[in-house]
Amino acid sequence: MTPYDPHVLETRKIDPQVFSTGLRNLAIVLALLYLGRDVLIPISLAAILSLIVAPLVRVLRRLGLGQNVAVGVSGLGFISFLGATGLVIGAQFFSLMADLPQYEETIRAKSQMLREVTLGPIEDIEHQVDTVLGRRVSGRLDDPASRPARAPAARSPGPAEASTLDLEGLPTSPVTLLTTVAARIWAPLQLTGIVVVVLVFLLLDHENIRDRFVRLAGAHDLTRTTTAINDAGERLSRYFASQFVMNLGVGAICGLGLTLIGLPHALMWAGLTALLRFVPYIGVLGVAIAAAIFAAAVSPGWSLLGLTLGFYAVLETVTGQFVEPKLYGHTTGMSPLAVIVAAIFWSWLWGPVGLVVSIPLTLCLMVAGQHIKALGFLNILLGDAPALTMPQRFYQRALSGDSHEIIRAAKAYLKRRTFARYCDRVLTPALFLAGRDFRNGAITEAQQATVRTVVATVIEAIDTELGRKSRRYRRVSVLDDDDIAKHLRRQRELAIGQWQGPIAARPHSVVLGVGLGARGDDLAAEILVRVLRDLHIDARNVSMDDLALAPPPEASSESVLLVCLVNLNRERPEEHVQLAFAKLGTLLPGAQLALLLLEEESMQSDTPIKVPTGTLVLNSFEAMSQHVVGLLVSEA
């Protein structure tokens, strides 16, 4: 049997004991991550930065520089780049703060306008409710005596008072001032210093650290361990490289666009946009809101605010929906839902830093699930590969009676591949799954009827004969009997005639698909005929009993080019196949003979089936259709 699509992963059965072991190990790991976050956060940040800097180190090594020199140059270059970016953004920020006083009147006017629009109606409603309910303590509502006494208006402080207020709360000595400032900046400086030191050592001792990790993870299985490490490293490197290039491009476009619409300090907003795009979901949203507030503050009208919000909305929509999917592709291999859940989980576990490192850390967990059996469920939960194969999805939807979804998926598949390949990769394996459950009694008679009805509906809907591909498919409500092959053949005969084509056909132009009598064989023969007719070949489905009947006077055995017996999972014994070939050789001596042997992988036999000399045995609809096309070309 032809194997499934190579890009579709097989679903593996999960042992309950292995699953419980994986959950226990996962709980232990999560506890360690939470308790050791003060140590693990700087190490994680350094490891991520090392993946960004490592490609530059490798380039410098290829140019002939030593390891230490390459690491030093790369580290200094990276730190200089970050420092220059910070200086530019900082200079722009201080310039913005210096310009704020000239926007004071605009800010005050718009604040008053917003208060009137938002709080004003609410206060009016409260006043009317108080009036209706009579909640005034005494007197008329307009009685000044009944109104609450207002607090005296705030008086502007005099020069002396202003000086007192300005100095209030500030340190009284330079030592105290320095101590206060150092206390505020010590934590971020400490984190930055640790990250830089760890980053340098990771780059300098990269090979040794990798060897130690391989030894720790599993030196007894170097192939699997090395594959896992390389897989994680390559995915992370591709992701960071793509994201770095993407964010730089978005920052440049943002700076140009904000300059064109007239927003001051566009360079600062562009830099913040490029940097905060590394923070999933909330980074760009925060910059857009801040830029919009600033636009409302600097412009007397509201047009600049609308242009700023519109620009960010269009920019993120285009990059998020069109550019990034093509640039990233399946760089991480994580599902979109897994990305969102990872952001929520790691931000809860490690705070803002966890949000930044959520995708890399979750990617490492997913790769571990691919290569460690006990953590296999992580790959299923986090990966973007389909949880079910296409045949499994077909059979699951058939059990549910959902023929519409199967047909939509089939038509999407047929836009890229042939009908024969669909039958080999999807339809036939799904029939094998159904046949296995039929034999084991795993489904009820009602479910069997539902599956037969759905299979018949799908085959009729995707058949291209007589323009069915362009017509709206219809659902088969109830089959006349439980034999799908007879039903499908009857439908074709009603559409194109009893003989399924002209009786007086030209020599060597007709291909006969013959089932061996079992229901699976007859259904496979009908599918083969539809596959060949999809290629505009005069193929007809007949049974052994039909061949024994007297043909019409206009019919001639010379019109038959090939007779193909179809055997599904060797449902008929080998002796029956040999007798059928002998009978066909007598009835149609001028026709070539072939056997289409379709076997489920779990039921394949190493013993080849015995057929007459010169009889071709093929194992897929696609191979048989190619063989028939070759015969017709040679006859022409």
Image (cartoon, grey):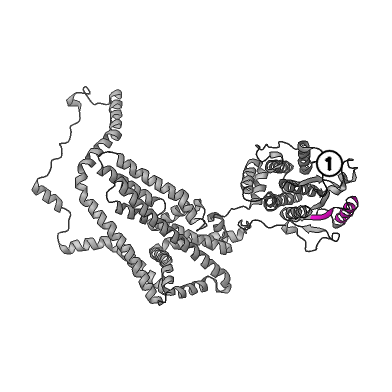
Residue 68 appearing in the image = yes
User: Which residue is found at the position 21% from the left and 63% from the top?
Assistant: 179
Q: Nearer the viewer, residue 601 or 189?
A: 601
Q: Position of residue 238 (x, y in %)?
A: 47, 62
Q: Position of residue 367 (x, y in %)?
A: 53, 62
Tell me which corner region of the image, top left, top right, bottom left or bottom right, holds residue 277: bottom left
Q: Is residue 16 left or right of residue 182?
A: right
Residue type, mark 1 in image: Ile
Main SS of the magenta segment? helix
Q: Is residue 375 left or right of residue 606?
A: left
Q: Which residue does the numbered mark 1 point to in the structure image? A: 503
Q: Nearer the viewer, residue 135 or 533?
A: 533
User: Which residue is found at the position 57% from the left and 64% from the top?
Assistant: 371
Question: Is residue 588 located in the magenta-colored stretch of the structure?
Answer: yes
Magenta region: 575-595
Question: Is residue 90 located in the magenta-colored stretch of the structure?
Answer: no
Image height of 278 relative to 128, above or below: below
Q: Is residue 306 left or right of residue 429?
A: left
Image height of 368 relative to 509, above or below: below
**Looking at the image, which residue sits at the far front?**
636
Image height of 461 relative to 390, above or below: above
**Looking at the image, which residue sits at the far top?**
140
Indicate the quadrant containing the N terminus: top left, top right, bottom left or bottom right.
Answer: bottom right
Q: Secondary structure at mark 1?
A: loop
Residue 354 appearing in the image = no
Q: Residues within 10 Å of mark 1 (few under 14, many from 20)?
A: some
Q: Position of residue 541 (x, y in %)?
A: 80, 45
Q: Is residue 291 left or right of residue 339?
A: left
Q: Nearer the viewer, residue 330 or 571?
A: 330
User: Which residue is found at the position 30% from the left and 64% from the top?
Assistant: 189
